[in-house]
Amino acid sequence: MTSATPAVDAASLVAVPGSSPGTALRTDAASAAERICERALGGEALLTHVLESEYGRLGVILIPVVDIDLFKDKQQTVAAALKGVELAAEHGAKCVSFTGMIPAATDYVRDIAAAVRRRGAENPTLNGLQLTSGHASVVAAFAFNIDSLLDFASRSYQDERVAFVGLGSIGEGIARLMAARPAPRHIYLVDVTEKRGALEQLKSDLTREYDLPAARIDIVTVDPQQSLPDHLYPEISLILSATSGPEVIDVDALAPGTLIVDDSFPLGYNARKAVERMDRVGDIMITIAGAFQSPARFAPKFPPASVEDAGLDELRRIMSRMSNPWPDCLTGCLYSAYLTPHYELPETIGPVQVEDASCFYETLRRHDFTGTRPYFFTFGFERRDPIYSLGSPRPLAAPDPGNARALSE
């Protein structure tokens, strides 16, 4: 590391964002991301900015793969992540976390960990480096943000009819973590048809953990790339989503009073439609699941750019705003690179375990972490701010299933 290279204590890896707030812009967004990957990064990882706080210096590293391409070629994705890990180690990081769908595309970081072990024989700086998917941190943040949104709307989890939409590592993790709470009025477990066996097992486990009659937990299956079935919208008041398919939630079909806490990637709903409905009517509320409000405050620093590229400069600005929307707010996947060594929390490689998520949740609760003020991402469409904030708390009555059904008939 040269004297001009900024030192960091931890690092988090980000794939080049090719996402957009709606299908109409997806092709343009993907093309712009490909251009940045090829022209600005040139196949190498890049330290885009550093977040300074009382926990130390966190480096945010862009890796040379577009997020929507992560599943196309696992070998290429792992190679891109390995370049990011090596750059993190070069800058002095002791722990590295992974954002977005990087964990899901790499067997929850197990493939990256194996590649790092192999490379460690040639590059000793990698030996002893902590790696974490960040998923336990994200699940803990999810639980905090469920509480925050319910408080914001003057509601209680016990009174909700809850749909867990997308039950992968994060979705199943939050379903199991929330089982430590008093049970809601009804639970819907929603995922693709091929996962029915896993959903049946999860239903059995939750029935036992909540001590509920099986009739209070329903399984709903859909085909891949299909949105929620129409009959479900009038039945649910709170959606907890963690999907990998875009826009599986139809904003226009939501019953008035519906709350959404979303950790999907891409977003589980159309952000443009959500902004329009919330600006025009304000009868739904949505927030991002995976960020913390914390005792620390973060100051972003931008090292001198090694390449001149207007698209990359704009991307760095948007990335900084989305990961750190307010001085005391940071997304959980990034935060986990700080928190894992600082509080001696478990590394999470492989699907998240509820014991690890609970450990993160209880530890951070004791240290005054909370959910954020409700907000969600816009990706800066139509020159908007990259985030949309809901403003001040206000009561929002939960939808009544009987009334909603009558209105839809």
Image (tube, rainbow, N blue to C red):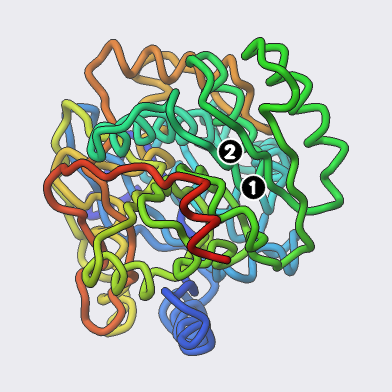
Q: Residue at left 61%, top 47%?
A: 165
Q: Which residue is mark 2?
A: 170
Which residue is painted at 55% across and 67% down in the image?
A: 247
> Neighbour class for label 2 at 10 Å: few (<14), some, many (≥20)?
many
Q: Nearer the viewer, residue 210 or 404?
A: 404
Q: Quadrant of the C terminus?
A: bottom right
Residue 265 position (above or below residue 214)? below
> Is residue 140 shown left or right of residue 82?
left
Measure how far apart labels 2 and 1 are at the Cα level.
Answer: 8 Å
Image: 1 above or below 171: below
Q: Is residue 391 left or right of residue 320?
A: left
Which image quadrant is residue 207 in?
top right
Left or right: where 208 falls relative to 316 = right
In the rendered image, residue 58, in percent from the top left (x then y), is placed at 30, 41
Q: Given the image, on which type of amino acid does mark 2 rest? A: Ile
Q: Nearer the viewer, residue 338 or 17?
A: 17
Hey, what amino acid is under mark 1?
Gly
Residue 295 horizontal/vertical position (percent)? 16, 26
Marker disc for residue 254: none
The circle drawn on residue 166 is 1
